[in-house]
Image (cartoon, helix red, strand yellow):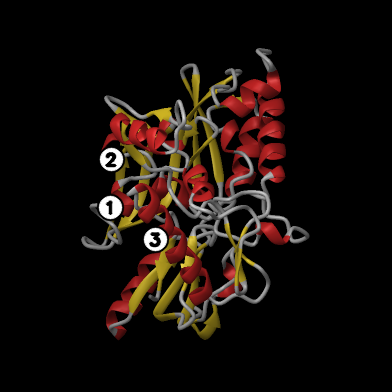
């Protein structure tokens, strides 16, 4: 094991803020990961497992413990009946994984193109976009169980997937470390075109998987939601807030207060609807391009808080707090952040 000291974490995150890790190491295999946890336990050090860094915000003080960067690689394809089981290491680049699947004409993850991060982070947040979620195709997740010190496999049901939720970020948070994820994809399947933006782009046509992927990436690029070193708006943690789910009566009350026939919303089961957080943020006065010190809101997407070049994590949090308070004061809805906060 190579264990480094005082390694700045900002370069390992897409928002590019954050202080140093007391200790830092890389795990390229499950065995290395187990050994690193054993080392940390013997030293009495806390451990944070870092993936692609696309959904984290590290404090300016950094992390007082061991940061383990997961770099388990490899993708395997196994034909099972009329489907293909695809096993991918937690350290595999997510968009690279999607591209490989689309190139092999495997349907099930095409609408998740262009999302930054690694495979291992996708079941944690139940990553979703443009009408598709990873929980629709995940068969099982192989993990290191920190409590038992063993490697375990969890079925889709055992992962407890909900909108942007799983046991990995709720009831069993910090217990499991994702090592590999197994997906069930459909050879020659049709892309999932249910999201309004995609339906409008294809006007009722039947695109190929490749066309769907390219269109999703184009839409994301227009919103600066694709990592691009030449685009300062992409220096972010992606969508900073989850779309809140409320009762239809709450949505109706908001519409009535704003003197609107209705507000943007999507069915979310039973008597609930999902309201776009971006819409709430803009209605609360935070337009695209809003600036607060060295932090700001993307000029292309009001749901992305960006590092304008030299922001501190304290400045990012200040804008997060201000946005949350304004939406809460105006609508009585408290927006929930999507990123994981480290070292706060």
Q: Position of residue 258 (x, y in %)?
A: 44, 38
Q: Secondary structure at mark 2?
A: loop
- Say whether marks 2 and 1 touch (CB < 8 Å): yes
The residue that label 2 is drawn on is 160
Q: Position of residue 28 (x, y in %)?
A: 51, 63
Kindly report which numbered mark, 2 or 3, lies closer to the viewer in this rendering.
3
> Which one is nearer the viewer's eye here, 291 or 219?
291
Q: Is residue 115 above or below residue 267?
A: below
Report if the CB atoms under discs 3 and 1 are less than 8 Å apart. no
Q: Which mark is residue 325?
A: 3
Closer to the eye: label 3 or 1:
3
Q: Residues within 10 Å of mark 3 (few under 14, many from 20)?
A: some
Residue 170 — which label? 1
199 above or below 275? above
* The C terminus, quarter of image: bottom left
- Asked if residue 221 lies left or right of residue 154, the reply is right
Q: Between marks 2 and 1, how big is the CA–CA gap?
A: 9 Å
Residue, x 74% and y 61% (percent of image)? 229
First of labels 2, 3 by sequence position: 2
x, y percentage for residue 334? Answer: 34, 53
Looking at the image, which residue is at 36% across and 66% down?
Answer: 34
**Horizontal relation, residue 182 to residue 155: left or right:** right
Determine whether label 2 and label 3 are within 8 Å by CB. no
Residue 81, relative to residue 305: is it above or below? above
Give whichever of 144, 126 is nearer the camera. 126
**Between discs 3 and 1, the one toward the N terminus:** 1
Locate residue 273 relative to residue 291 in the image: left or right. left
């Amino acid at each position: 094991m190579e264990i480094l000291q005082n390694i700045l974490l900002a370069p390992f995150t897409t928002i590019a803020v954050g202080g140093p890790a007391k200790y830092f190491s890389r795990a390229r295999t499950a065995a290395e990961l187990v050994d690193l946890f054993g080392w940390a336990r013997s030293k009495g050090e806390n451990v944070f497992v870092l993936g692609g860094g696309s959904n984290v915000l590290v404090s300016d003080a950094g992390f007082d413990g061991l940061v383990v960067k997961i770099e388990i690689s490899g993708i395997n394809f196994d034909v099972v009946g009329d489907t293909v089981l695809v096993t991918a290491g937690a350290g595999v680049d997510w968009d690279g994984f999607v591209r490989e699947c689309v190139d092999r004409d495997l349907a099930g993850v095409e609408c998740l193109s262009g999302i930054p991060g690694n495979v291992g982070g996708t079941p944690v947040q139940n990553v979703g976009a443009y009408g598709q979620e990873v929980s629709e195709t995940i068969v099982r997740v192989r993990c290191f169980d920190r409590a038992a010190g063993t490697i375990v496999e969890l079925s889709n049901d055992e992962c407890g997937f909900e909108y942007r939720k799983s046991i990995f970020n709720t009831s069993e948070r910090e217990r499991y470390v994702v090592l590999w994820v197994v997906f069930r994809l459909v050879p020659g399947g049709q892309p999932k075109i249910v999201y309004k933006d995609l339906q409008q782009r294809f006007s009722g046509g039947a695109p190929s998987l490749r066309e769907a992927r390219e269109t999703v990436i184009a839409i994301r690029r227009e919103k600066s939601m694709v990592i691009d070193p030449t685009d300062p708006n992409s220096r972010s943690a992606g969508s900073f807030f989850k779309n809140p789910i409320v009762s239809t009566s709450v949505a109706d009350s908001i519409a009535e207060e704003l003197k609107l026939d209705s507000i943007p919303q999507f069915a979310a089961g039973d008597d609930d609807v999902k309201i776009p957080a971006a819409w709430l943020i803009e209605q609360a006065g935070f337009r695209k391009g809003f600036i607060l010190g060295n932090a700001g809101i993307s000029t292309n997407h009001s749901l992305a808080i960006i590092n304008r070049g030299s922001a501190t994590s304290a400045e990012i949090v200040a804008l997060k707090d201000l946005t949350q308070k304004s939406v809460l004061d105006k609508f009585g809805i408290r927006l929930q952040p999507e990123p994981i906060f480290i070292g706060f």
